[in-house]
Image (cartoon, rainbow, N blue to C red):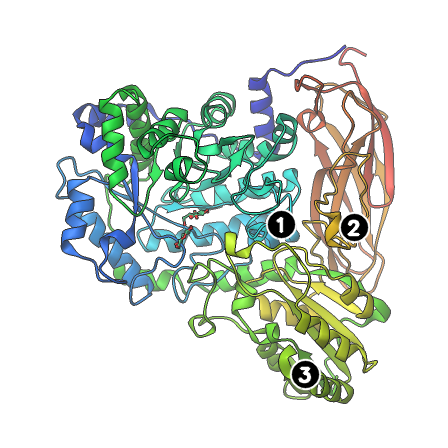
């Protein structure tokens, strides 16, 4: 017998997996009443203004020179609903106080409008409030995924949110919940990697962190399929089966709804021939009706226009705009022109967009504005802004997350940690002398920060010097130094640190058709290798690079991803044994380009021979797993509880990330090779044993059958934790 899960039941229970408390977004009737009262007073002009978002650039005459006429025109005449700073959209000077003054100035103009509706101001604070100079740059989401530590994820989001609120910003275009389907994509580092369960847990926790104070709305983006273009590239066509949507791409977004996220942003790309922004199926049927989303939906940058101008899926701009609002869009990130506001007005007048649809969009936006407390107070105290950016806790959490994310991939003959009494070390590779490389894109500027603009933190080189510089000679050479110099310095050193990876990038400019190290980096590695000295490799990149040859010849290898301003210090902590690494790969690292796309959870009959698999990561100690306790059967509809004893069998303290997977021995559809179904990060002293318990919910055991109905099919499954496994049967509830 099969039990079918009605979608609603599924909704409720998936929610319980992710939250012990309720975070669901339930509307308050008192606010709904206020919204309705305000809506009835609004003219058509005020409504189309409310559903429009303009970039702050449109109000300026050159950076930071806010023009009185432009502000009057946009904020007062057009009664605009929202303003944003895109990547690099900082005022001048770029200080927290100036940001607060800027948002206060804009809000001041709203008082001159007829209904005095406050603005929502949005930014991309995707790894801290990092468009602001002097902000702590937190490790990127790819690091957060590698840390397997949801508590720290939530805490980092909460701290980011404090700085947003202090600068008068109520809206964060984060987290990115796209699944990284192909590392050629220039936004891989903004994601939580390739696994939907990990992304669901982390995304939900970050949303809770961002929204905790009630002063900031988070934004689940980019719904949906953005990271899944066939070519692997940004804003390229994607061909996605409904099965892949349901099994892989929807879950993090569904988890976001259940975590109470207030806003959604739509995928700029096109899916199965339909631009996502024009898809009523995605925006209304799935998001609203199936997921039960209650908040409001914003477009991505210029995307209503792109339906016409890029995707060619509308005869003209007006019809493109009409199409996206009719599909279910609530606010358009226009954001560089006022023309589209006029066109939307015309579209409503001509009956292309029903007034009820526009009213609904306005309602959804106003509700969130009321809830954020903007109608009571739309201003911040600019004199307090600076102080919000200098809380020691920000640096501490950033450092902890960076340390916890760093992943040890190889450590032959215990090359690491390096002894602090080492006499001479060569640090090679320009990445060692860069903070910008550690921070990646969306740091001050869209494509990444200039070195001199990063005030906080350390480069790797500076952190190493700080740690051992008093007693050891620390030499540095960039890869451009050339072979002779590298060989000479390498010969003189006791140990060599080779830093490779990528420079900062964002979005489409970050797409790559090849993921090799640069020719200079390869030449550097070759030169260093020829010395016969032990080489430890550090990779600074937010996506898997082709490091097979580099890892073969190195004695040790670390993946640091994009660990932010505390990353240099965190890497030094790991290199010299002040922190025992426990990060785990949130993506598969391929041996060569031809293997792409490569994911651990593809179907069981797909070849999976990565260089390093998803979830891989070593430690300076050894962990042993024993006593896997699992029942022989689990009844349909009931949770499955399993436990395992983890022992630190080495002689240094450390964390272990225990990963639980399952696979269907068979099912009505070909099983995935493995599915992560639980993880826990535990700290263990030498000799210490802890029992780790996982509860797998019935919803996690669902199979989307041949007709895509979610069914907990009766079948044998194999549970795997480390080398241990247990076979159990899912049996009928009445058995
Ligand atoms: C990006 C979004 C971002 C927006 C605003 C777009 O180009 O795709 O992720 O939120 O710009 O900066
Ligand atoms: C980005 C914005 C950025 C702009 C720069 C857009 O695609 O999303 O954040 O400011 O390009 O031109």
Q: CA distance from mark 1 to mark 2?
A: 19 Å
Q: Is residue 307 visible?
A: yes
Q: Nearer the viewer, residue 152 or 225?
A: 225
Foreground: 688 or 716? 716
Q: Quadrant of the rendered structure where residue 215 is?
A: top left
Q: Which x, y percent locates residue 222?
A: 49, 40
Is 322 on the left-hand or right-hand side of 541? left
User: Of label 3 and label 1, which has the lower sequence position?
Assistant: 1
Quick check: 359 left or right of 703?
left
Identify the residue under disc 2. 610
Q: Is residue 483 above or below residue 125?
A: below
Vertical placement of residue 181 versus 481, above or below: above
User: Which of the labelled discs sits on residue 145, or is there none?
Assistant: 1
Which badge, 3 or 2, comes first in the chain's sequence? 3
- Of circles 3 and 1, which is in front? 3
Q: How many marks?
A: 3
Q: Residue 485: which quarter of the image? A: bottom right
Label ID, residue 286: none
């Amino acid at each position: 017998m099969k039990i079918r899960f009605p979608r609603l039941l599924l909704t409720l229970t998936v929610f319980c997996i992710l939250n012990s408390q309720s975070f669901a977004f339930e509307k308050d009737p008192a606010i709904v009443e206020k919204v309705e009262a305000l809506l009835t007073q609004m003219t058509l002009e005020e409504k189309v203004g409310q559903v429009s978002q303009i970039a702050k650039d449109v109000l300026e005459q050159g950076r930071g020179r806010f023009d009185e006429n432009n502000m009057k025109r946009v904020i007062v005449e057009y009664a605009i609903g929202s303003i944003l700073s895109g990547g690099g959209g900082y005022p001048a000077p770029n200080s927290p106080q100036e940001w607060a003054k800027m948002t206060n100035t804009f809000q001041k103009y709203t008082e001159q409008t007829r209904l005095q509706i406050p603005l929502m101001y949005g930014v991309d604070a995707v790894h801290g409030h990092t468009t602001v100079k002097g902000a702590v740059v937190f490790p990127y989401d790819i690091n957060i995924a590698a840390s397997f530590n949801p508590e720290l994820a939530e805490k980092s989001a909460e701290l980011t949110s404090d700085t947003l609120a202090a600068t008068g910003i109520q809206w964060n275009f984060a987290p990115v919940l796209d699944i990284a389907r192909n590392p050629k994509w220039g936004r891989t580092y903004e994601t939580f990697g390739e696994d939907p369960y990990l992304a669901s847990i982390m995304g939900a926790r970050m949303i809770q962190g961002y929204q905790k104070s009630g002063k900031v709305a988070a934004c689940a983006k980019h719904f949906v399929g953005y990271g899944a273009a066939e070519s692997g590239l940004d804003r390229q066509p994607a061909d996605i089966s409904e099965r892949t949507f349901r099994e892989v791409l929807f879950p993090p977004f569904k988890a976001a709804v259940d975590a109470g996220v207030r806003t959604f942003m739509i995928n700029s790309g096109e899916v199965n021939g339909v631009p996502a922004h024009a898809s009523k199926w995605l925006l209304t049927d799935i998001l609203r009706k199936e997921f039960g989303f209650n908040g409001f939906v914003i477009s991505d940058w210029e995307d209503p226009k792109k339906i016409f101008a890029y995707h060619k899926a509308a005869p003209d701009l007006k019809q493109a705009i009409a199409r996206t609002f009719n599909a279910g869009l609530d606010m358009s990130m226009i954001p560089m022109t006022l023309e589209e506001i006029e066109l939307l007005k015309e579209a409503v007048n001509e009956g292309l967009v029903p007034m009820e649809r526009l009213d609904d969009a306005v309602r959804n936006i106003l509700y969130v504005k009321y809830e954020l407390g903007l109608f009571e107070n739309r201003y911040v105290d600019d004199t307090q802004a600076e102080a919000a950016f200098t809380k020691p806790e920000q640096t501490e959490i950033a450092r902890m997350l960076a340390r916890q994310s760093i992943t040890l991939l190889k450590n032959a003959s215990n090359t690491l940690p390096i002894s602090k009494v080492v006499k001479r070390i060569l640090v090679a590779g320009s990445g060692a002398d860069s903070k910008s490389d550690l921070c990646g894109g969306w740091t001050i500027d869209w494509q990444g920060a200039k070195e001199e603009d990063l005030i906080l933190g350390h480069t790797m080189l500076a952190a190493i010097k700080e740690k051992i510089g008093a007693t050891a000679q620390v030499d540095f050479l960039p890869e451009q130094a050339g072979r002779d110099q590298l060989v000479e310095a390498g010969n003189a050193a006791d140990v060599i640190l080779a830093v490779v990876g990528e420079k900062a990038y964002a979005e489409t400019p970050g797409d790559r058709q090849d993921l090799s190290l640069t020719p200079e980096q390869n030449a550097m590695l070759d030169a260093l290798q020829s010395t016969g000295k032990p080489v430890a490799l550090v990779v600074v990149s937010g996506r898997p690079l082709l490091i097979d040859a580099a890892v073969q010849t190195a004695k040790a290898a670390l993946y640091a991803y994009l660990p932010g301003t505390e990353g240099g210090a965190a890497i030094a902590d790991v290199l010299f044994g002040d922190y025992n690494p426990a990060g785990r790969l949130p993506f598969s690292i391929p041996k060569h380009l031809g293997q792409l796309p490569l994911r651990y959870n593809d179907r069981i009959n797909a070849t999976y021979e990565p260089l390093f698999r998803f979830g891989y990561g070593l430690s300076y100690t050894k962990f042993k797993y024993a006593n896997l306790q699992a029942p022989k059967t689990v009844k349909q509809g009931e949770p499955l509880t399993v436990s395992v004893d983890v022992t630190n069998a080495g002689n240094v303290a450390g964390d272990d990330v225990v990963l639980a997977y399952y696979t269907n021995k068979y099912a009505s559809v070909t099983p995935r090779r493995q599915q992560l179904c639980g993880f826990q990060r535990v700290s263990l002293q030498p000799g210490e044993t802890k029992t780790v318990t996982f509860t797998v919910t019935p919803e996690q055991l669902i199979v989307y059958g041949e007709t895509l109905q979610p069914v907990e099919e009766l079948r044998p499954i194999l549970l795997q934790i480390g080398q241990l496994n247990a076979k159990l049967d899912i049996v009928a509830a009445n058995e």
